[in-house]
Structure formats: C-alpha cells, structure tokens
Image (tube, rainbow, N blue to C red):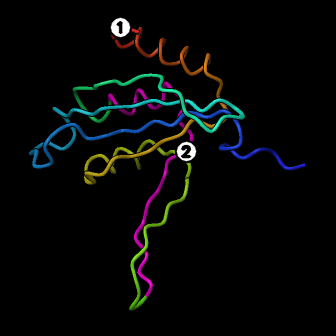
Amino acid sequence: MSPASPFESNYARIGVYHNDPRDLHDRVNNRSFRVQIHHRPDGSNLEQNVDDILIEGNVGAVITLLNALCVDLVEARALVSLGSGPTLLTSEVVPFVAAEVTEYFKRVPEPLTCFVSQIDHGELVERLDLWAIENNKTP
C-alpha cells in the first residue's frame, strides 16, 4: 500500500499576498505581506480558516513564519504555450526551499501558496502560537 499523498490527509494551506505597491526601491526591506492560513481536516472537503496575519518589515519575517509553520511544499505555476493554440496555466507542488521563496518575493508580484503536509489542527495552532510568542505577536 502506498502512503497517502499530502493532500489525502490533514494539511495546511498558507497563502502569502503582497500587501504593498510593487514599485518599491528596496524589494527586501520595508515590505508588507498578508498571510492567510487554512487547515483541511482529514476526510473533509472544507478548509477551516486558522489565521490572517499582516507582516510588516522584510521578506525575512515571512520566511521566519513559513519556517516556524514547517512549510514543506510550494505551489509552482507556469504558463505553457501550446504552439499556435492557447496558453495554459499549469501548476505543480514542489519542495519548499527558503532561498528560492525569498527570491520569488523579491521579483514576482503574484501571491504564493505554500503547504504543510500531514498536520493536524492542534499542531498547526501550536506552531503558530510559538511563532507569535517568539516574535512578540499576540497569539
């Protein structure tokens, strides 16, 4: 029997959205991001909203949160041209690499979707609370 895929069991989906103008001179510091965290319990088709966080500061603050949540997967999107036919948007899930995600935030204005595979709700909330305490945020 093969193991369950990350999306056949409990998982968390984390959406990271740029919350600032894209014509900034400094693309690393003085940034603002909105991070929305959702959890999908095993056996359910519905996701539960866990938190909505505004991070002001720099790209490193977002990476710190993603590391604290133990993000392990990132959605990668690409446009694929079908010759003279239509152009399709394809999507796949790839491993989370902090350096690559940092570069993405520096140059791409599109939101990024990350995942924590196989996590239960209580563990997700606990990781979020620990991050909040370590970063002087209100849990």
Is residue 58 highlighted in magenta?
Answer: no
Closest to the observer, 67 or 126 = 126
Q: Residues within 10 Å of mark 1 (few under 14, many from 20)?
A: few
Instruction: From the top left corner, tell me how far across and down residue 115 is, in percent.
Output: 53, 39
- Dividing the picture into quarters, in which one does residue 102 lie? top left
Q: Amino acid at mark 1?
A: Thr
- Dividing the picture into quarters, in which one does residue 137 lie? top left
Instruction: From the top left corner, tell me how far across and down residue 80 is, in percent.
Output: 43, 75
Span highlighted in magenta in the image: 61-82
Judging by the rendered image, the residue that carries numbered circle 1 is: 138
Q: Quadrant of the C terminus?
A: top left
At horizontal 39% and vertical 31% (from top left) the residue drawn is 36
Q: Secondary structure at mark 1?
A: loop
Q: Is residue 136 above or below residue 52?
A: above
Q: Residues within 10 Å of mark 2 (few under 14, many from 20)?
A: some
At horizontal 42% and vertical 66% (from top left) the residue drawn is 78
Classify residue 95 as left or right of residue 82.
right
Classify residue 5 as left or right of residue 117.
right
Judging by the rendered image, the residue that carries numbered circle 2 is: 73
Q: Are marks 2 and 1 in contact (CB under 8 Å)?
A: no
Q: Secondary structure at mark 2?
A: strand
Q: Is residue 84 above or below residue 38?
A: below
Closest to the observer, 69 or 48 = 48
Q: Please report whichever mark, 2 or 1, sits nearer to the chain's N-terminal start.
A: 2
